[in-house]
Image (cartoon, helix red, strand yellow):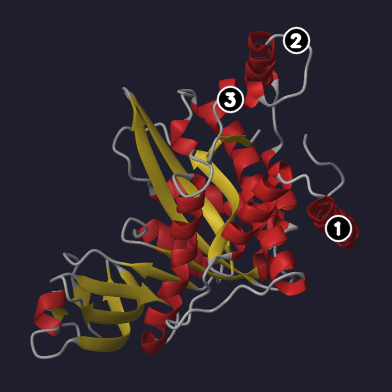
Amino acid sequence: MIVENGAARAVQFQEVALHIPSTAKVESVERTIQSFFKDYEFDYQQVCVLLILFLRRGKISLSIDRTEWDFGSYQCNILMIVAKNDSIGIPLYWDLLDNKSGNSNCENRINLLQKVIEAVGKERIKMIIGDREFIGLSWIEYLKGNNIPYCMRVPKSHLITLKNGDCYSISELLSTSSERYFQDCMVDGVWGNCLLKRLPNDDYLFLIGSFPAKELGRIYRKRWCIETLFQAFKGRGFDLESTHLKCSKKLSKLLVFVSIAVAICVKLGEHHHKKVQIIKTKKHGYKANSFFRQGLTVVRRGLKNTTPAFVKLWSDCIATFIRWIDIQFTYNQRLEKMFG
């Protein structure tokens, strides 16, 4: 479903149809693709389990966030939970929100996280991280009630009640200091630990979580993996915003293919880094390319380069990837079928 369109990646059905080998006319191939998205039903629980196979074994750090864009009068509004894999997230579950306000509510988040828990098991979740939208008494109480460690950013307008019962705004607490930490304080009726920090742009970083207050900043930075994923979905990767789909149900199906494509690129990038060419680290300490970007480059060159040496390298990568998938299937006996 993800094809090359000149120098770009494309998910439009017309472009996909041009790259599918067939004796039929392009219009006929495109109608077949449209029929698939209209009639086929995915088992999203099995899709989630498949995507989990791409993660390293052990506990996983989750991030929850929402991305949106407008296509004419249609507003695409995706709520997603991803698992951190190096600097990028691997999508696990998503929900296409039909409301026009944009924001998710506590029920949306709880339902989505519950589906992830059913797929991975609660004991495998190390933590969940969210931005300023992801607060609310019911949501945080759900996390605490299920013993899921959390770190959420809070809007600067919210008040903090300290252990002595005194209530303050964040500007009051930071009037004489640029950063402060509070254990066992209350925000929006929820008890937790808080980090308050004044930022250079006259904004504030206000975090609440179940971790020690001084660790919250380090933990919150893990959330960047979901922003990197959204970049891979959009302009820096598969140009998902270019799709003209206006049906949430069909768009959710397209996300299955794009999510699997991202996961494959990440694993191929990791393999290429370990076995073929190490990705250089720049002076600022970050890699010159992410595993996703490296893997995407390998895929694109493999589709274009027909020299014998590169064909062999490409074939070896694919063979290694297939063996890896086979091992993962054997290890995860719960995956009995790919799709419903």
Pick the quarter of the image with the C terminus.
Answer: top right
Secondary element under disc 3, as helix, strand or loop, is: helix
Q: Earlier in the sequence, mark 1 or mark 2?
A: 2
Neighbour tally class for label 3: few under 14, some 14-19, many 20 plus, Cα within 10 Å: some
**Which of the labelled discs sits on residue 24, or is there none?**
2
Neighbour tally class for label 2: few under 14, some 14-19, many 20 plus, Cα within 10 Å: few
Amino acid of disc 1: Asp
Q: Residue furthest front?
A: 307
**Which of the labelled discs sits on residue 14, or is there none?**
none
Amino acid of disc 2: Ala
Foreground pick, 64 / 71: 71
Foreground pick, 232 / 173: 232
Amino acid of disc 3: Glu
Q: How many numbered dots are placed on residues in this image?
A: 3
- Relative to 195, does residue 145 appear above or below in the rendering? above
Secondary element under disc 2, as helix, strand or loop, is: loop
Left or right: 242, with 182 as reference point: right
Residue pictured at 47% horizontal, 50% vertical: 236
**Which of the labelled discs sits on residue 316, or is there none?**
1
x and y percentages locating residue 101 in the rendered image: 29, 37
Residue pictured at 57% horizontal, 20% vertical: 14
Q: CA distance from mark 2 to mark 3?
A: 15 Å
Foreground pick, 199 / 22: 22
Q: Is residue 167 visible?
A: yes
x and y percentages locating residue 313 in the rendered image: 81, 58
Residue pictured at 33% horizontal, 45% vertical: 103
Mark 3 lies on residue: 15
Neighbour tally class for label 1: few under 14, some 14-19, many 20 plus, Cα within 10 Å: few
Q: Quadrant of residue 32?
A: top right
Residue pictured at 42% horizontal, 81% vertical: 284
Q: Earlier in the sequence, mark 1 or mark 3?
A: 3
